[in-house]
Amino acid sequence: MACLLDGIRVLDLTNVLAGPFCCYQLAQIGAEVVKIEQPGKGDLARQLGGDPAMNAQLMGTSFLAQNAGKRSITVNLKSPEGRAVFERLVETADVVVENFRPGVMERLGLSYDALRAIHPGIVYCAISGYGKSGPMAGNPAYDQIIQGLSGVMSVTGDAANAPLRVGYPVCDTIGGLSAAFAIAAALYRKRVTGAGEMIDVSMLEATLGTMGWTVSNWLMAGHAPRPMGNQNMTAAPSGTFATGDGLLNIAANKQDQFERLCALIERPDLVSDPRFQEREARKRNRDALTLSIEDALSTRRAADWAALFNAEGIPAGEVLTVPQILAHEQIEGRNFVHNFDDPRLPTGRVGVVRAGFRLASGDPRPSSPPPELGADTEALLDELGYGAAARTELRAAGAV
């Protein structure tokens, strides 16, 4: 596996998705990630997922999805003894990641300033809906709330059904990726200078930061974004088209691609039609162009057209379901899904997705299956210097 962060210890105090996803990316490239969970309950995601039996086992699929490769210790941060355990962990760590609402860590006595006093070089990353400042800083936030506030929902769907939620937690995921990127940058500087950092990740701002074209069209061109369904605002034909069997995405964004497309579907007349001769005209008349193209596409399957178009340099792809793409030769050929045998689970295995990049020095992947709640508590306490008697006392006090 990739060892770009070999020797880095990350303390993961996060729950559900944005924070765990951030720390999962770090684990896949070699960091030792220690997940610090509430005794008896753990990460809420342990109870979430499609299999009730696995949820009851505190190994819900929502947890399994982004916690492979981590260790788990249960610590009660509300108890003095538990905070002392955590502070001892901080002495050994390089990074602390939390996604509590702003103010929670301060009330626990575990703010960045408090942890920096213990370990001056600590990289502390706080992930929240709106960041640590501003009038909304204290508001609770979930992915769908951020999707709505950010404008994502306003441009998802079409004129008849927008606004629509994106079908997966896109804002949580973007927040997690932004956090992982910031942490990696801070760790580089730490290696050079020894200086730590306080990172304040706003899911709202991270999401807006990925909406560059949409935002810039308004800021610089005064063009208010609108929902366009499966069509591309920048070009035509560029969107989703019906075929003889299945839907096909086509992105013939360049003039030469459009002309080759017309030749391949045996409609060369479209090239000379005044409505479609150049980009802006095609955008104005996209509905009529779509009807003509779909009529021609009705003679073959989406898969056949995709193969033909791609061979001629016209970007195209079938519209697939999640099961279909996971079984696709492209995904299987690059071993994107990593499986662990795991007799703890009804399926007997855990399948998780890897990072979206490969490395010449060793591909990113998690080193171990997701941990049971508190699976590494004894071992980690022993590493921190707590003897058997001390560990017994901590358990009796409800600290771990």
Image: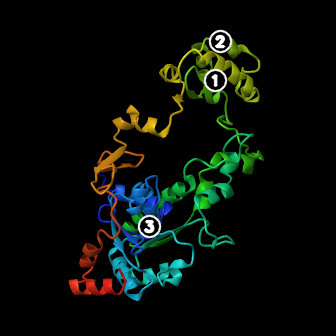
Q: Amino acid at mark 2?
A: Pro
Image location (x, y in percent) of residue 319: 54, 32
Q: Secondary structure at mark 2?
A: loop
Labels 3 and 1 touching (C-beta < 8 A): no
Q: Which residue is found at the position 29% from the left and 57% from the top?
A: 344
Q: Residue at x 63, y 71 (%)?
A: 137
The percent position of residue 325, horizontal first and vertical second, equals: 45, 36
Residue 268 disc label: 2
Report the amino acid beneath label 1. Gln
Which numbered disc flags the more N-terminal residue, 1 or 2?
A: 1
Tell me where residue 108 appears, x and y as whole percent.
49, 83
The Cα–Cα distance between marks 3 and 2, rounded to whole angstroms, is 59 Å
Q: Quadrant of residue 33 in the image?
A: bottom left
* Residue receiving disc 3: 43
Q: Nearer the viewer, residue 250 or 144?
A: 144
Label 3: state its secondary structure: loop
User: What's the image's color scheme?
Assistant: rainbow
Judged by depth in the image, the label closer to the viewer, 3 or 2, is 3
**Which disc is residue 269 wearing?**
none
Q: Is residue 357 above or below residue 117?
A: above
Residue denoted by label 1:
255
Quote the CA–CA distance across marks 1 and 2.
13 Å
Viewer can see residue 273: yes
Quadrant location of the C terminus? bottom left
113 and 352: which is toward the camera: 352
